[in-house]
Structure formats: structure tokens, C-alpha cells
Image (cartoon, helix red, strand yellow):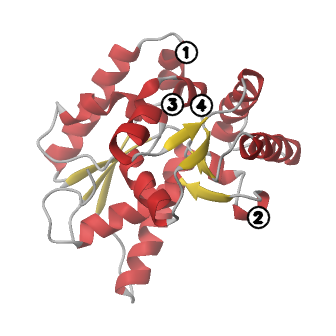
């Protein structure tokens, strides 16, 4: 089994979910007392959040590059970046190391294609919903159209992520707000919903949506185990 190199801490709540899901999937596949071979480099989310909202993406790219280098030196065979938003800086990782990055958009898009959908609604941070790095990769590489909520709804979704979910706060009223945004996306033509922030799965499950959901943390974790157990040297998805 390959050693999975996890870049975590964005936030630690979702990184803990990654760790659990990866090891549960490994045990499901291999049985017995098996768990995944993994390393984690954890950044300080207080620093990351501040730099995100002040637009210091160059400094964040340097931070990710150093984290990836740390994992490569420690013996990781590939990188899993435990966040959707920071995939905006995926190139900072791929430029810094020789080992591959398992991209969260690629894993998610493959799951969407298996479901037979071509138009999806996206719940995520404002950065992920409003900037092109996520939406264009879905469209250009996989032919999937991404629908985003209204400006007001985007702000609601974003604030709940940073003010509540990243702090481990789960509120029923916030769950209802997300359900309202899911309905808005369905009315705009979405066939299913991408939970495009790794913390959203702490709040929203399939039971909360009348549309099928694509939980990116669970999808990415499963793809990591798949790649760790296969013989290929590069991820099976582009």
C-alpha cells in the first residue's frame, strides 16, 4: 500500500473526518486490523483563514508547497490536500514535489459522471463558488456545468462555513438555511449537489437534500484509498 501524504488543518475538523474515512475504507477493503499508511502535515488554520480573506494567495501557495515537500521527504507516495478551496493553489504543490497530487475536483467529477449528471449545484466557500479554478476544471475537463447560488445565498453559505463549521459548531437553523439554498439550486436546474467544502459534510447529509449529493470529503478519501492500493504510479483520474 502506498503511503498517503495528507495536507490538513483547513480546518482540523474536516482533516479528522478525512483520517477516519480513509482508515474505515481501508479496513472495509482489506479487513482485519488493517488501516492506511499515512502521514499528515497540519497547517494552522488561523493563519490560512487570515491570508485567504486578505488575498495573500502567493503566501498560501508557498505554505502548501513547503507542506508538500515535508511530506515527500518523510516518504509519502502522493499528496491529498484536505480542502476544496485551497485547490485554487494546486499548482503550488505540483511544482514543489515529484510525487503526484490526487485532485479533489477530478475525484468528485468522476463520481458525478457515474451518477449520470451533467449539471450540478455547488455549495462551498465564496472563493470556490466565485473563482474559476473549480468551475472551469469541472467544465473543461469533464463537461460538467456548475450552478452557483445567488449572491445573498453564497454569503450565507460562506459565513456558516467559517463562523460555525470550521469551529465545530453545528446548528439546526444553519442546516435549514443550507436546505433552502439546495432548493434554490434545484429550481435553477441543478440535477444534484456538490458539497464543495470539506466541512459541509459535518452539517449536511443525504437525508437533508431532495437532490442527490456528492460529498467531496468522502469521495476524495475513497479515491485516496483506491490509488494507495493500486499498482499505478499516477492517479487513475486526470
> Is tag 2's residue or tag 1's residue first in the polypeptide sequence?
1
C-alpha distance separating marks 2 and 1: 32 Å
Query: Residue 182's image quarter?
Result: top right
C-alpha distance separating marks 3 and 2: 30 Å
> Is tag 1's residue or tag 4's residue first in the polypeptide sequence?
1
Q: Residue at 40% across / 47% down in the picture?
A: 104
Above or below — where is 179 with respect to 29?
Answer: above
Q: Which residue is mark 3?
A: 45
> Is tag 3's residue or tag 2's residue first in the polypeptide sequence?
3
Do we see residue 81 in this rendering? Answer: no
Indicate the position of residue 38 as horizontal and vertical percent values. Answer: 30, 60
Is 138 positioned to the left or the right of 14 in the image? left
Extreme residue in the right direction? 173
Is 165 positioned to the left or the right of 70 in the image? right
Is 166 positioned to the left or the right of 209 in the image? left
- Mark 3 or mark 4: which is in front? 4
Count residues near mark 4 (Cα–Cα under 10 Å), then give few for <14, some for 14-19, many for 20+: many
Per the image, label 4 sits on a secondary structure element best described as loop
Above or below — where is 91 with respect to 103?
Answer: above
Indicate the position of residue 115 as horizontal and vertical percent values. Answer: 52, 65
C-alpha distance separating marks 1 and 4: 11 Å
Q: Which residue is mark 1?
A: 53
- Mark 3 or mark 1: which is in front? 1
Tag of residue 125: 4
Count residues near mark 2 (Cα–Cα under 10 Å), then give few for <14, some for 14-19, many for 20+: few
Count residues near mark 1 (Cα–Cα under 10 Å), then give few for <14, some for 14-19, many for 20+: few
Q: Residue at 53% across / 25% down in the picture?
A: 127
- Mark 1 or mark 4: which is in front? 4
Q: Which residue is mark 2?
A: 207
Amino acid at each position: 500500500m502506498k503511503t498517503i501524504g495528507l495536507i490538513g488543518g483547513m480546518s482540523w475538523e474536516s482533516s479528522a473526518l478525512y483520517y477516519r474515512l480513509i482508515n474505515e475504507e481501508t479496513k472495509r477493503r482489506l479487513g482485519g486490523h488493517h488501516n492506511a499508511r499515512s502521514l499528515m502535515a497540519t497547517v494552522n488554520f488561523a493563519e490560512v483563514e487570515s491570508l485567504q480573506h486578505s488575498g495573500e494567495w502567493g503566501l498560501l501557495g508557498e505554505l502548501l508547497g513547503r507542506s508538500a515537500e515535508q511530506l515527500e521527504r518523510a516518504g509519502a507516495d502522493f499528496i491529498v490536500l484536505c480542502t476544496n478551496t485551497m485547490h485554487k493553489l494546486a499548482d503550488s504543490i505540483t511544482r514543489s514535489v515529484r510525487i503526484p497530487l490526487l485532485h479533489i475536483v477530478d475525484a468528485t467529477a468522476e463520481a458525478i459522471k457515474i451518477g449520470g449528471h451533467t449539471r450540478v449545484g455547488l455549495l462551498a466557500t465564496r472563493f470556490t463558488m466565485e473563482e474559476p479554478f473549480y468551475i472551469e476544471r469541472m467544465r473543461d475537463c469533464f463537461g460538467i456545468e456548475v450552478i452557483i447560488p445567488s449572491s445573498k445565498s453564497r454569503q450565507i453559505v460562506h459565513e456558516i462555513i467559517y463562523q460555525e463549521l470550521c469551529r465545530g459548531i453545528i446548528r439546526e437553523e444553519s442546516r435549514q438555511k443550507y436546505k433552502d439554498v439546495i432548493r434554490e439550486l434545484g429550481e435553477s436546474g441543478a440535477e444534484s449537489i456538490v458539497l464543495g467544502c470539506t466541512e459541509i459534510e459535518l452539517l449536511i447529509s443525504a437525508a437533508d437534500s431532495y437532490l442527490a449529493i456528492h460529498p467531496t470529503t468522502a469521495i476524495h478519501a475513497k479515491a485516496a484509498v483506491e490509488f494507495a492500493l493500486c499498482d499505478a504510479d499516477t492517479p487513475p483520474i486526470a
